Image: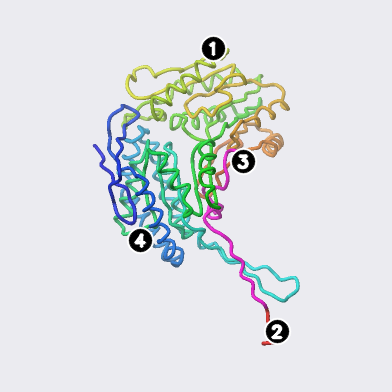
Amino acid sequence: MTYQMKMYIGGELVDGQGSKDVFNSANDKHVGTVATAGIDDAQRALEEAKNAFLSWSKTSISERQSWMHKLRDAVIANEDHLRECIHQEMGKPWAGTKEDFDSLKNSLEFYANEITHVHDSTIADRAGTHTHRLVREAAGVAVAFIAWNFPLLNLAFKIGPAMAAGCPIIIRPSEATPISAYAVGELCHQIGLPAGVVQILCTDNYDVADHLSASPIPALITLIGSTNTGKHIMRTGATSIKKYSMELGGNAPALVFEDADLDVAAEIICAVKFNNAGQVCVSPNRVFVQQSVLEAFTKRVVDRAQSVGVGFDKTKDILTGPVIDARAWKRLKNLIDDASIKGAQVLTGGDRPVGLTEGHFLAPTVLSNVTEEMDVYQQETFGPIISIIPFDDEDDLLKKANDCGDGGLTAYIFTRDLDRAERYAESLRYGEIQINGVKYDIDLPHGGIGQSGIGHDCSYLALDDYLVIKRITRFLDRSAA
């Protein structure tokens, strides 16, 4: 199967000023060619979105809901096609593509309903001479830059609230995984979505991406990506005053105390770390384990790592696919080698899985004796590597857990002592704290603290990023009564 995909601009499927070949990371096979945008294409999309804002922002909620439901129905009818696009463009295991698909369907459903809960509010006038009404309305044109690790999930987190709020949105998928996003563009075209409401264009020319950021047309720029990318976009976008919503990098700690259910802790940490080959922003990077249970916990993690299914075969139970490309594989191998040189022990993994000779697979890896001097400790690994760090001093533990460099996205706590869990949860500087479990859903806010982002994806809070507040004050002319 080879995909030939066009951009979706101004309600039309169009060729771009260039093209890009896409290769499956599981086997390096060519899977398709997509049209790519030049600056003229990007400018056309901006102008189309600007024009669409005049009408789309004024449509009734019921009309916007109707279009969102039409798109949702088209998504549902094309489940296998959309999932196959992801499966092929990034080598993601087939089971893993379901999360991407469900996220898109659920986002369209959730925000079509959630927008009905947005209401005007009033403020009482202290002197009784005026009335004051607060009105929430669409912020304007949105530009979304989305990462490759969850091609449709990341798109879903942006398209749902944007459409519901009345904001035309230009989506720039990663050049590594544009096929599934372009497939959504085809569905928008199929249902006859009004021109400019959603536009999808890919580019591997960063001048074109910067053109989208630098334009004064967008009122909001939203991103799923690295902290460095977020900083760059904010610098580039400073040509005008804009809103920003960004989910950025993290260096998540997991705290495993001696009274934890070690089976639960090991199961959750391995599942989150080895799913999607560890290319997950909320993956636990540094696993701090109390010394008294270090050996027992480590054995559980190693046993699970060695039993994880790795590969690309649709017929098998596979959790871990390839990392995105050769450069990512080399970076991860360098992290492992650096840790080994500095005293860490590779308990399992550390290189290619046995029997997989093609593609960019890294065996699920467990490192022990990891210390702060190692790059794998300091950096967000974004790969299937678990770093185990022993601790005894709980005060020192909190300091180390919060010393996360750029990231303050997610932290995990495993303990049966709920007072301890709450105490640490209050002291950890992360946007999300998961205690003895893990849960993500479209109705739960997802966002970081500090260098891990601004604003939120998911939940009703995401709508705040796409809405602005207008105050309407009226003088009470009592003499006219």
Q: Mark 3 and mark 2: span between their CA atoms?
A: 49 Å
Residue 165 as seen in the image, left or right of residue 394:
left
Magenta highlight range: 451-475
Q: Amino acid at mark 2?
A: Arg
Q: Earlier in the sequence, mark 4 or mark 1?
A: 4
Q: Which mark is residue 194?
A: 4
Mark 4: give few (<14), some (14-19) or many (20+) Cα within 10 Å: some
Report the Cα–Cα distance between label 3 and label 1: 33 Å
Which residue is labeled 3 in the image? 449
Q: Secondary structure at mark 2?
A: helix
- The answer to which of marks 3 and 2 sits earlier in the sequence is 3
In the image, what residue type sits under mark 4?
Answer: Pro
The x and y percentages for residue 474 are: 64, 75
Disc 1 versus disc 2: nearer the observer = 2
Q: Is 456 positioned to the left or the right of 193 in the image?
A: right
Mark 4–mark 3 distance (CA, rounded to whole Å): 37 Å
Gap in angstroms between the C-alphas marked 4 and 2:
46 Å
Q: Look at the numbered disc 1 and give the secondary structure of its residue.
A: helix
- Disc assigned to residue 209: none
Residue position for label 1: 341
- Quadrant (top left/top right/bottom left/bottom right) for the C terminus: bottom right
311 shown above or below 197: above
Kind of residue at disc 1:
Ile
Whether the residues at callouts 1 and 2 have beta carbons within 8 Å, the answer is: no
What is the C-alpha distance between the residues marked 4 and 1? 58 Å
Does residue 103 appear in this view? Answer: no
Question: For the residues carrying marks 3 and 2, which lies nearer the camera in this image?
Answer: 2
Give the x, y percent position of residue 288: 62, 25
Residue highlighted by disc 2: 478
Contact between labelled residues 2 and 4, with CB atoms less than 8 Å apart:
no
Q: Secondary structure at mark 4?
A: loop
Task: Provide residue 449's location: percent of width, then percent of height.
Answer: 61, 41
